[in-house]
Image: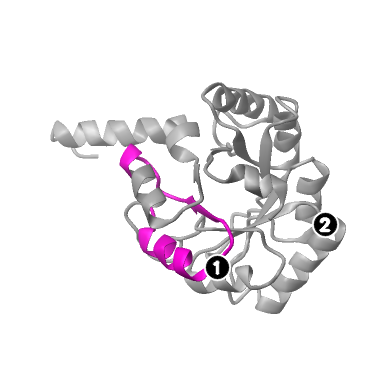
């Protein structure tokens, strides 16, 4: 196991991201968000795009950064691979000094198993020491990634993309704990403190929380909607 991966075991990872249509978009804002996460005790962050990863790196040399590079378009479909989908996207993350590279490891009509293996091979040849996290949507993808020989962590990041799931995907986590020897990252729909209890019980070796910590407009929306419901005001 790579040392940087070992250092992630038992850690809570804070995903610090903001899109162009939100007020916190931009590298300077992301630096401040990462600083807030570190102030709160985070030792590992997940950051998107080269400029934001570079900004996060200035916070601390000791901070573990999981880097991604989302490539998105207005006409994107559910089967489009969008988290670090190409070698060029991965190279940007690696060159920005991320410690771990996360990528979309789904197998879809738009990306075959062979194409995923070729991408992983290219990444490993370019950066032999970088950790690789496979963001998956189901058990089959997790098993394929784990058995590829190129991946260091499997993650439930994209679970729920194809079916509605309330809360963390505990069923997938339990299956992974029984079938995968690699470290498991629980990510997705972790909103409550009890969710942390549940994913740890299900076998997660580390967890990633994004929206519930770092997306203020969605946190606000959640509370406003619940309050309106309590008041009988509807949406």
Quarter of the image for the C terminus: give it. Answer: top left
Give left or right: position of 234 versus 80.
left
Above or below residue 213? Residue 74 is below
Q: Compute the Cα span from label 1 to label 2.
A: 21 Å
Above or below residue 104? Residue 211 is above
Asked where in the image residue 193 lies, by quadrant, the reply is top left
Above or below residue 142? Residue 210 is above
Query: Which residues make up the magenta segment?
Result: 168-194
Query: In the image, what residue occupies the spot 37% across and 41% down?
Result: 191
Asked whether 157 falls inside the magenta stretch, the response is no
Residue ID for mark 1:
142
Residue 233 in view here: no
Residue 32: percent from left, percent from top: 62, 22
Residue 32, disc: none
Give left or right: position of 148 versus 23.
right
Way the structure is coloured: one colour
Give left or right: position of 135 versus 218.
right
Asked whether 171 falls inside the magenta stretch, the response is yes
Q: How many labels does the image show?
A: 2
Above or below residue 41? Residue 226 is below
From the viewer's side, name the closer residue of 111 and 199. Answer: 199
């Amino acid at each position: 196991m790579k040392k940087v991966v070992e250092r992630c075991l038992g850690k809570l990872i804070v995903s610090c991201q903001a899109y162009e249509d939100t007020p916190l978009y931009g590298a300077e804002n992301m630096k401040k968000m990462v600083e807030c996460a570190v102030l709160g005790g985070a030792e590992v962050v997940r950051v998107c795009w080269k400029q934001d990863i570079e900004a996060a790196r200035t916070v601390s040399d000791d901070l573990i950064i999981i880097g991604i590079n989302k490539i998105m378009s207005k006409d994107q479909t559910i089967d489009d691979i969008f988290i670090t989908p190409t070698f060029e996207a991965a190279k940007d993350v690696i060159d920005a000094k991320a410690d771990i590279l996360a990528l979309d490891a789904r197998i879809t009509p738009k990306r075959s198993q062979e194409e995923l293996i070729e991408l992983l091979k290219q990444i490993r040849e370019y950066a032999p020491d970088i950790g690789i996290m496979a963001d998956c949507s189901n058990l089959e993808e997790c098993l394929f990634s784990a058995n590829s020989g190129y991946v260091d962590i499997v993650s439930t990041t994209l679970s729920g993309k194809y079916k509605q799931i309330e809360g963390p995907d505990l069923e997938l986590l339990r299956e992974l704990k029984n079938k995968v020897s690699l470290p498991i990252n629980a990510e997705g729909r972790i909103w409550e403190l009890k969710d942390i209890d549940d994913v740890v019980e299900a076998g997660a070796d580390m967890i990633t929380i994004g929206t519930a910590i770092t997306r203020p407009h969605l946190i606000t929306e959640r509370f406003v909607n619940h309050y309106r419901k309590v008041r009988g005001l509807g949406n």
